[in-house]
Image (tube, helix red, strand yellow):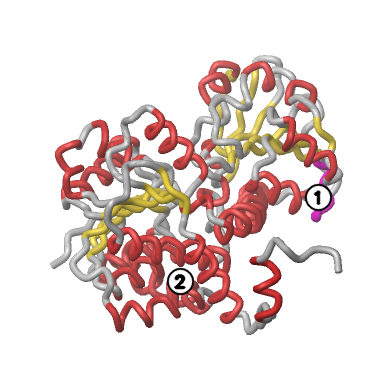
Amino acid sequence: MNEYKVKDIGLADEGELLIEWAEAHMPVLRQIRQRFQRERPLEGVRIGACLHVTKETAVLVKTLEAGGAEVYLCASNPLSTQDEVAAALARAGTHVYAWRGETTEEYYWCINRVIDHRPMLTMDDGADLVSTLHSKRTEALEDVKGGSEETTTGVIRLRAMAADGALRYPIIAVNDTYTKYLFDNRYGTGQSTIDGILRATAILLAGKTFVVCGYGWCSRGIAMRAKGMGANVIVTEVNPLRALEAVMDGFRVMPLIKAAPLGDIFVTATGNINVIDRRHMELMKDGAILANAGHFNVEINLKALEELSVSKRRIRPNLEEYRLRDGRRLYLLAEGRLVNLAAAEGHPSEVMDMSFSNQALVAEYLWKTEGLEPKVYDVPREIDETVARLKLRGMGIEIDELTEEQRRYLQSWREGTI
């Protein structure tokens, strides 16, 4: 019997249907699974995974298991688990420790339960698993050969660990590969964040002033989708290059302190702390909506929001009203956690197909590769291009190939103007 802890194993039938639906829209992982079943490249490998427990993650887990791995899975966010999916995975034999609505104590209990099984490879989304291994569970580090990181926030933390000399094993930054951030971060986050906001509020976006904090790849997607639905988008930034790009993309750019009185909806996606702070909340109009699309619930200063408020009430699922001393009301979505996963279902399966195909192939690469130093690496280019080719094949799209003459020309420095 496999060990697990989920909310209700009786939800497994519903979870299997969700996984089946995701699988039908993830052709790249299906192709990788077919090869993994034949070659078994991960035979006997214990993989500790701290990921959002969604239907798409289940397709990744099944692919890893087809390759011979034993997977131990916990959630990377207390509100992102789809309990039906967790139940289906548990019933199928995966060691799952995840349920929606975990307390902070329960969240870390689940991470520690994964570590108890002494993983040989890690897969993280936010770096909480890696951080716990390096701070409180160092005895388990000797078994770990390498790991991968799924999201921008986690890569930032891991690069900081590497810079401090604290990182004890190599990590590959899946987040930073083209077939991840150009698609998952931009199109996935863009669509799923809007989806979460609309499910939580049922408001009309057209005509609203929509403030996007940051202009990284996730924020680009959010701004693009909000503009496409008729919102008047303002971008705030600290990076002059990104701010300039936002201007050239047609958005108004200004400091958040100037945008605060103008916005109807505010969304953070920066990976930093207290982006929306007390001084901004004090200027916001009555009825302003606050949402976060960054990994951790630190981008909106929740302590300041509580201190400014005289009352709080739940209006509908994932929508809380904070009434301030002067009578203004501010509305917080999904407790300030990832709005696209807490209030919706996360990214569409089609885009997670590429992200998780990178995860599967990176796990194979890490297990087969010797001599990697304990630092953060980019995904090998051949893996990135393989995922792109498989995705195009799955979409029924063909592309050109270079002729021999063209290859020779690109490799030569002698030929120029003829």
- Quadrant in which the C terminus appears: bottom right
Q: Position of residue 103 (x, y in %)?
A: 34, 38
- Amino acid type of the residue tagged 1 in the rendering: Lys
Q: Identity of the amino acid at label 2?
A: Leu
- Nearest the viewer among 58 and 105 is 58
Read off the residue under disc 2: 18
Between the residue at mark 1 and the residue at mark 2, the CA separation in whole angstroms equals: 31 Å
The percent coordinates of residue 123 (x first, y second) are: 35, 53
Q: Going by the image, does 229 lie left or right of 119?
A: right
Quadrant of the rendered structure where residue 167 is? top left
Residues packed near mark 2 inside 10 Å, few (<14), some (14 to 19) or many (20 plus)? some
Vertical position of residue 347 compared to residue 280: above or below: below
Q: Answer whether residue 170 is visible to the viewer in this image.
A: yes
Q: Is residue 199 left or right of residue 76?
A: right
Q: Which residues are magenta?
A: 227-233
Q: Which residue is mark 1?
A: 227
